[in-house]
Image (spheres, rainbow, N blue to C red):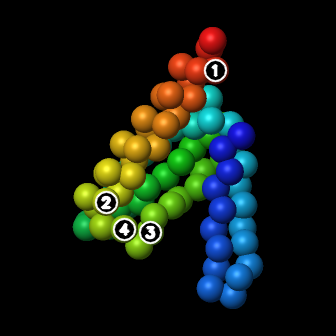
Amino acid sequence: NLVITRVFPSGKAQKWNLEPYWTKVEISNPRINHYNLILKSKEKVVMIGSFLNYYDKKRLMKKIEDALQNYKISYRV
């Protein structure tokens, strides 16, 4: 599983478990100059990196896509 953990300043943690084989990464643009980096896996949707600018979100999206692709390749073996 792919585990996403958000840790709040209070120390409280929130976790999501995603199936990496079905996970997709996208950037949505709900408002002008506002972009969301989203992970989708089946019925689950997780927004990450809200503090990042657009270009950093694109770089992170590429790294996540590469990692997911490597997982999918190794999963087939």
The answer to the question of whether label 4 and label 1 lie on touching residues, with beta carbons closer than 8 A, is no
Question: As shown in the figure, which amino acid type bears the numbered disc 2?
Answer: Asp
Q: Earlier in the sequence, mark 3 or mark 1?
A: 3
Q: Which residue is mark 3?
A: 50
Mark found first going from the N terminus, 4 or 1: 4
Q: Dots 4 and 2: beta carbons under 8 Å? A: yes
Mark 4 to mark 1: distance in Å? 31 Å
Q: Nearer the viewer, mark 4 or mark 1?
A: 1
Q: Which residue lies most toward the top here?
A: 77
- In this figure, which residue is indicated by the disc labeled 1? 75
| First in sequence: mark 1 vs mark 2 | 2
Residue 67 in the image, given as x and y percentages of width and height: 49, 37
- Which image quadrant is residue 56 in? bottom left
Q: Which residue is mark 4?
A: 52
Q: Is residue 70 above or below residue 45?
A: above
Residue 64, given in percent of the width and then of the height, sits at 46, 43
Dots 4, 3 in contact, CB < 8 A = yes
Q: Position of residue 28 (x, y in %)?
A: 38, 53
**Is any part of residue 6 visible from this angle?**
yes
Q: Are marks 3 and 1 in contact (CB under 8 Å)?
A: no
Q: Which residue is disc 2 drawn over? A: 56
**Figure quadrant of residue 7:** bottom right
Of discs 3 and 1, which sits in the foreground?
1
